[in-house]
Image (cartoon, rainbow, N blue to C red):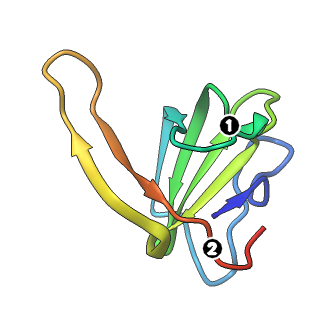
Amino acid sequence: MALNKNHSEGGGVIVNNSENVLMTYDHVEITFSDLEPMPEAFKGTKKGSVFLTPYRVIFVSKGKDAMQSFVMPFYLLKDCEIKQPVFGANYIKGTVKAEAGGE
């Protein structure tokens, strides 16, 4: 898990040489809960794009926000569920664990 490490000033994503972007989704919203205390960068609903690579999911927000990018490596994602409500948009719900010794 990394915050503000994988975005470019133009609103794009920065990936390592060993990976490529498999899929991109625009008009994505991300919300964080169950954080105590809740840091300012994680408050509210963030809007932006998601980039899927073979190793991780990268969220890049649009606009000027405290959270410009958020990286979720697959090995740190736990308890993921795909929800498809009758009324409302489909969404994925899960837990992202902080990496030991990470920033």
Instruction: Indicate the position of residue 5 as horizontal and vertical percent values.
Output: 78, 60
Q: Which mark is residue 61?
A: 1
Q: Please identify the quadrant where the C terminus is shown.
A: bottom right
The answer to whether residue 23 is above or below residue 99 is: above
Q: Which one is in front, 27 or 46?
A: 46
Query: How far apart, in angstroms, are the residues tagged by discs 1 and 2?
Result: 22 Å
Instruction: Indicate the position of residue 66 as horizontal and vertical percent values.
Output: 81, 36
- Badge 1 amino acid: Ser
Query: Outermost residue, left direction?
Result: 86
Instruction: Indicate the position of residue 11 as horizontal and vertical percent values.
Output: 75, 41
Q: Which one is in front, 67 or 94?
A: 94
The answer to whether residue 3 is above or below residue 65 is: below
Q: State the residue position of label 2.
A: 99
In the image, is 1 to the left or to the right of 39? left
Q: Are marks 1 and 2 in contact (CB under 8 Å)?
A: no
Q: Residue at x 25, y 50 (%)?
A: 81
- Badge 2 amino acid: Glu
Query: Outermost residue, front direction?
Result: 36
Place residue 9 in its image quadrant.
top right
The first of marks 1 and 2 along the sequence is: 1
Q: Please identify the quadrant where the N terminus is shown.
A: bottom right
* Secondary structure state at the residue bearing disc 2: loop
Q: Residue at x 27, y 32 (%)?
A: 90
Query: Outermost residue, right direction?
Result: 9
In the image, is 27 to the left or to the right of 61? left
Place residue 18 in its image quadrant.
bottom right
Q: Which one is in front, 58 or 93?
A: 93
In the image, is 41 to the left or to the right of 88? right
The answer to whether residue 23 is above or below residue 33 is: below
